[in-house]
Amino acid sequence: MNSTGRSFAQPAFALASGVLFGAGLALSGMINPAKVLGFLDVAGNWDPTLAFVMLGALVVTMPAFRLATRTTGPWFAPRYMLPERKGLDARLLIGAALFGVGWGLAGFCPGPAIAALVAGEPRV
Amino acid sequence: MSPEFTPVHGFVGGLLIGAAAVLLLVAIGRVAGVSGIADGLLARVAGDRAWRVAFVVGLPLGALAYGIGFAEPEIRVDATLPVVIAAGLLVGFGTRLGSGCTSGHGVCGIARWSLRSIVATIVFMAAGAATVFVARHLA
């Protein structure tokens, strides 16, 4: 496909993906910080829903990613742009830990935060 | 266990999130990591912005569409505004330093059996649970 076709197809498919993703966040309840904190509160009134969300997502992505990356490439881009870093390092561990603390403070991770703060009228 | 436990809605919502990630990979070769996609909005690499804008716009549109078509999702924020701001800074900085968040590491990375993503997911879940434990049960 030529670059003009791609420049239309890329945002169109990204929009469709974002819409599906946002609908999934709303349906699963993960758009609700109170529900996310319910998952992280293992010593309290534990709400395991988030684990089922991950399970549902991985049931789809695990086989599909494997099949997809065996093909020659994506429909509207030259190649798959997958993370290339390998191995564990301090940046990864410290970054994940800081993110986790922030996540636990308010119940927002990036996807739900964007979906909720724009779409909803959060009751703070 | 919480009476608000909703495994079926969670699982089906997860299927949608997984389908969204597969669509993005198969169509344009990108990993559906929300923190990375949003971060790239600021980088202003030529020809690399339109799809990011479209994805980020799609997130609230999808949530709105679900609310109109099915049920208004509950969004309850118990934290005070200063805590939300501090949390946002930690989430933003931490996901950039750690190269991903719940979607990039937790959904897409684990699907590729990435050791980095599996470890990152364990670390941020443990840190999140520890933070909630301190805030709710010790403070």
Image (spheres, rainbow, N blue to C red):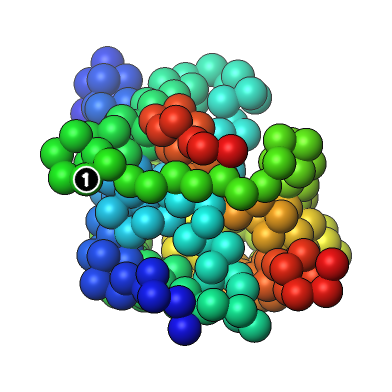
* Residue A116 can be seen in this image: yes
* SS at badge 1: loop
A106 displayed left or right of B72: right
- Front one among A81 and B135: B135
At label 1, the amino acid type is Ala
- Front one among A6 and A12: A12
Q: Where is residue A42 in the image (x, y as percent from the top left)?
A: 61, 80
Q: In this view, does B115 lie above or below B35?
A: below
**Residue placed under numbered mark 1 in the picture:** B71
Residue plotted at (29% across, 33% down): B64
Q: In this view, does B58 lie above or below B110?
A: above
Q: Look at the image and tell me in which quarter the C terminus of chain B lies.
A: bottom right
Q: Residues within 10 Å of mark 1 (few under 14, many from 20)?
A: few
Q: Which chain carries label 1?
A: B
Residue plotted at (19% across, 34% down): B68
**The image quarter in which residue B3 lies:** bottom left
Q: Position of residue B98 (x, y in %)?
A: 72, 56
Q: In this view, does B2 lie above or below A10?
A: below
Q: Position of residue A24 (x, y in %)?
A: 30, 52
